[in-house]
Image (spheres, coloured by chain):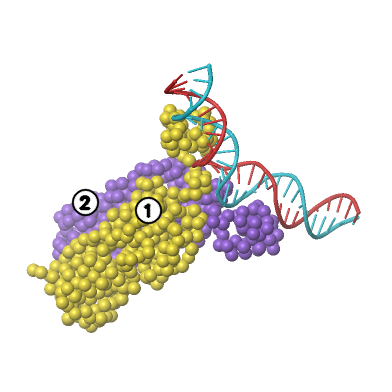
Chain colours: A purple, B yellow, C cyan, D red
Amino acid sequence: MMTLADIAALAEVSESTASRALRDNPVVNKETRLKVQQIAQQYQFNVNPTARSLRTQKSYTIAVIILFDAKSQQAISDPFLLEILGVIADELTHKGYDMLLSTSKTKDKDWKNYYIDAKRADGLIIIGQGEHDQRIEQLSHSRVPFVVWGASSGHDSFTVVGSQNRSGAEAAVSHLVAQGCKHIAFLGDYRHNEIEQRYLGYQDALQKAGLALNADYELITDFTAQDGYLKTQQQLFPLLPELDGIFAASDAIALGAMKALQEHGVQVPQQLAVAGFDDIAMSAYCSPALTTVKQDTINGGKLLVSKLLQQMDGEQAESELLPVRLLTRQSSARNG
Amino acid sequence: MMTLADIAALAEVSESTASRALRDNPVVNKETRLKVQQIAQQYQFNVNPTARSLRTQKSYTIAVIILFDAKSQQAISDPFLLEILGVIADELTHKGYDMLLSTSKTKDKDWKNYYIDAKRADGLIIIGQGEHDQRIEQLSHSRVPFVVWGASSGHDSFTVVGSQNRSGAEAAVSHLVAQGCKHIAFLGDYRHNEIEQRYLGYQDALQKAGLALNADYELITDFTAQDGYLKTQQQLFPLLPELDGIFAASDAIALGAMKALQEHGVQVPQQLAVAGFDDIAMSAYCSPALTTVKQDTINGGKLLVSKLLQQMDGEQAESELLPVRLLTRQSSARNG
DNA sequence: GCAACTTTTGCAATCGTTTGCAAAAAGATT
DNA sequence: AATCTTTTTGCAAACGATTGCAAAAGTTGC
């Protein structure tokens, strides 16, 4: 394996000069710079990032931590996750950073200690801030650069990037109302930050429409199709003749609910309209196709990265919520 | 930040002794060892992995490379991917390794150069070996420890872990045959290694059943529900009265196909039975629920890691294909 | 009490870079 | 030609661990 010393020798300069030349430091003569660079290229030399890290105290690595729900052992809305992960990976690569991935179930490492103090990573991206996580709160009292994907409380002590869950949910539910629904159920677990926002949006829409809130219509449901199916069977069937709409906090839940309804002979959307959240790949291809709210994964990933890098540069980074898009499909098409 | 030197000072021993004590090297006196360890614990000290890497020339990091299809820009069967990624992450953490994630679209870095030579990683896990990738072939001529998730040709020059795609597909198609299907279409892109195996399994089943192969029934289809939908509309509808079964190389494709069929008024499974591959979360919750073949993600991930570590210990690791499980659901239930 | 071991410790080199500082080289000004 | 600037270069000291080797301390046997 080649080292900087070898390249220096070949170029007949000192290691210092070689080092500077490779980083294109203008303090070294242009000709020398080019010569060194050319030789490095020729021998396919790359500086050893470990040695560089040790010396510079920077790792050029970002840790991405995916939080799993303690109970269901599932991360928020799987397909969405993979998408945003891909975007983040690309974005980081593009900026010259490597990406350390960690899936953190329940309580494990002390992030600051493990990633930052140990110089494994220069910053953290945390995805899936579920129920209020005190580890995040704690991080914000340190000097660790990090960003969170999730829901902003409006006055967080850290940088959050997420979707406009509340207005997105409101749009979806208002759409159901516009389709003539008067008794709309909410399926989702509002102890989860993002879902809470969707729940609030659901309430907003009902209130605007002058419809009464009804505790019987609010079902705490896990992120899975399975739970959507079960909760619908167990708690929605009894309300059925009257119930004419469902807003589910995720597409998976919505699909599970639709399954139960279909088995029970309920016509969707005629008797009951359904809307979800996420626009997972399947939503457009189930029957009936699911009305849903699509998050802007691409800009989400990009923002997470750029805001993190901004923090690492010592700047302040504001939280930001991205607009979402309501996609109306058959599952809610009741207007003839 | 604490360094080993600090700990050594506190314990009143030399750095060498402290270093050995922390690794529990029996050459150092047991009392001393305990004392050092206790102090390290107390001060939450962890050795700096960068410094350690530089000295030992090991990174205690594994790079996981996800290959994307050049054309569709999609990785093989998304939900499956996230699952196996999770298992790998857990397994690596458990063995004390960090995981570097890279999503590689088309041609980018020279893996050996970037990860191994630069000491960013000690080994590689490559997922989604699609069409024959010469970078993998090339790797196998080097001394780089790596494993691939995919299809084994039976005489690969590298270690492959994957599913028994061929026999799994055969089981699925045989099941369709047992349900009375006589004209079964195959949807999938057999230029992809794993899909090729599924395609062969499809042929096996037909041959065993004495059914004729029919080129019209073989549709090259991307990994998406969208393409399953389109190809079904375009190329299967014309064959319809006769066609009575579909085996799709992935659940996404199957769901897309079912959507098209339903829109066209075809009764599934009465007029036409459908089976897929993967058992994605939605498969059980669409209507009708999809018959499919489930891969053993958990053991897959575990094997990938253990075989890689085995290689890193200088041992040989054999390729291995895991058994799969046929899940029969409504989409193929034609026997009354 | 001394030689011959065995156990336990620490010195110092090493891993491959980066960078502050001073020295050398080159150019400009009298 | 001597002095003063301005460019370029290289020395040497980090960064924080690990480890071969030799020295120190502790045992044992006679």
Q: From the top left corner, tell me how far across and down residue A17 is, in percent.
A: 66, 55
Task: Count the labels in the image.
Answer: 2
Q: Nearer the viewer, residue A123 or A154?
A: A123
Label 1, on which residue? B315
Q: From the top left corner, tell me how far across and down residue A208 is, in percent.
A: 32, 58
Q: Quadrant of the C terminus of chain B?
A: bottom left
Side (left or right) of A43 relative to B45? right
Image quadrant where residue B308 sits:
bottom left
Which residue: 57% across, 47% down? A55
Which residue: 15% across, 55% down? A238
Q: Secondary structure at mark 2?
A: helix
Which residue: 25% across, 67% down? B166
Which residue: 68% across, 58% down? A12
Work out whether B328 lies above or below B29: below
- Looking at the picture, which amino acid does disc 2 mark? Asp
Please report, as a chain letter, where disc 1 is located: B
Please report, as a chain letter, where disc 2 is located: A
Work out whether A269 lies above or below A56: below
Q: From the top left corner, tell me how far across and down residue B314 is, in percent.
A: 40, 52
Asked if residue A251 can be seen in this view, the reply is no
Q: From the top left corner, tell me how far across and down residue A267 is, in percent.
A: 18, 66
Q: Nearer the viewer, residue A155 or B46?
A: B46
Label 2, on which residue? A216
- Classify 10 Å Cα crowding around label 2: few (below 14), some (14-19), many (20 and above): few
